[in-house]
Amino acid sequence: MAKLEIGVLAHLSRQPEDELKKVVNLGLRSCQVCSWEAELWTADIGKRLASAAKSLGVTISTFAGRDNPPANVEFHGRPEDHRPAAASVARRSR
């Protein structure tokens, strides 16, 4: 049976290293990265996020993001609604 880890949502920011340090400071090693700001979905930030995750020993299980959500959005969408954004970020971070 696979070992499951408790994690938290981590906000993607211009300082992804600082966001992952917050995860570690909570005593956790797993997170999901979430962002509504498509301008942050760059190769540079993606590489920094991946590097910080590796150096801090944090597993990023998924990325959830969407450009311009409605102001009253509640994050209950189906996973397939978020796959295009996740794929785009993955391609940019290579």
Image (cartoon, grey):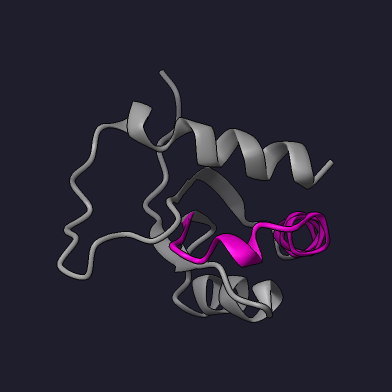
| Relative side of 57 to 33, left or right | right
Q: Is residue 41 magenta?
A: yes
Q: Quadrant of residue 57?
A: bottom right
Quarter that holds the C terminus = top right
Extreme residue toward the top, this view: 1
The residue positioned 65% from the left and 45% from the top of the image is 89
Question: In the rendering, at what x and y percent does residue 56 appear?
Answer: 71, 65
Q: Quadrant of residue 15?
A: bottom right
- Front residue (pair 78, 20): 78
Answer above or below: position of 17 versus 68.
below
| Relative side of 5 to 37, left or right | left
| Relative side of 67 to 81, left or right | right
Answer above or below: position of 12 versus 58.
below
- Front residue (pair 13, 23): 13
Helix, strand or loop for the magenta stretch, by majority: helix
Question: In the rendering, at what x and y percent does residue 13 appear?
Answer: 59, 75
Question: In the rendering, at what x and y percent does residue 28 appear?
Answer: 48, 64
- Which range of residues does the magenta coloring cover? 33-55
| Relative side of 73 to 25, left or right | left
The residue positioned 51% from the left and 66% from the top of the image is 37
- Front residue (pair 92, 63): 92
Question: Across the whole image, how many numbered discs are drawn on residues?
Answer: 0
Q: Quadrant of residue 90?
A: top right
The residue positioned 64% from the left and 81% from the top of the image is 18
Quarter that holds the N terminus = top left
Q: Is residue 45 magenta?
A: yes
Question: In the rendering, at what x and y percent does residue 47 appear?
Answer: 81, 56
The residue positioned 44% from the left and 63% from the top of the image is 36
